[in-house]
Image (cartoon, grey):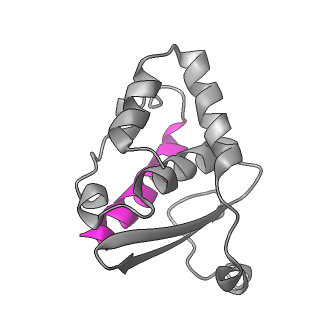
Amino acid sequence: MSSLSDIIETFQSVDAETRLDLLLDYANKLPALPAQYQTEAAHDMARVHECMTPVFLWIEKDAGKLKIAAEVAEEAPTVKGFVSILVDAFDGRPCDEAASAPSDLLKLLGLDGQIRMNRAVGLTSILSRIKKAAA
């Protein structure tokens, strides 16, 4: 588990090509969807409809900490990487960390110029959903 500020610092410290490689590395690190959510995903529950890519997101609060589970289609590694960053940064962390996350995270990660606008809308919606649930 990494802090969001550490992740941002890492992304800002490298060039654009390496940023994309980092994002793809994160895509490979997204934890497998827990069995308890697999049936819901199969029935299109918890889908983030603002995202063109099939993204499923479960967010719960437990004793002031956030629990996040997600599933992202394999054919969208950049989306999967971004979701994996959010899971890494916020899962198991205090809710206030996620609630106060910067809304311009794509820009802070240096990914705003590398991700198409239609994908950026979906990714921003995912972040907004997490922030709202954490608040």
100 in relation to 34, above or below: above
Q: Residue at x 51, y 46 (%)?
A: 85
Q: Residue at x 43, y 50 (%)?
A: 89
Q: Residue at x 56, y 51 (%)?
A: 84
Horizontal arrangement in the rendering, residue 5 relative to residue 36 (left or right): left
Horizontal arrangement in the rendering, residue 72 relative to residue 114 (left or right): right
- Residue 16 lies in the magenta-colored region: no
Give x and y (percent) for residue 97. Answer: 27, 56
Query: Front-most of 113 and 62?
Result: 62
Horizontal arrangement in the rendering, residue 72 relative to residue 123 (left or right): right
Which region of the structure is painted magenta?
116-135
Query: Front-most of 65 and 27?
Result: 65
From the image, which quarter does the C terminus lie in? bottom left
Give x and y (percent) for residue 35. Answer: 71, 80
Residue 110 in view: no
- Asked where in the image residue 125 lies, by quadrant, the reply is bottom left
Total numbered labels: 0
Give x and y (percent) for residue 53. Answer: 64, 57
Q: Main secondary structure of the magenta part?
A: helix
Residue 10 in view: yes
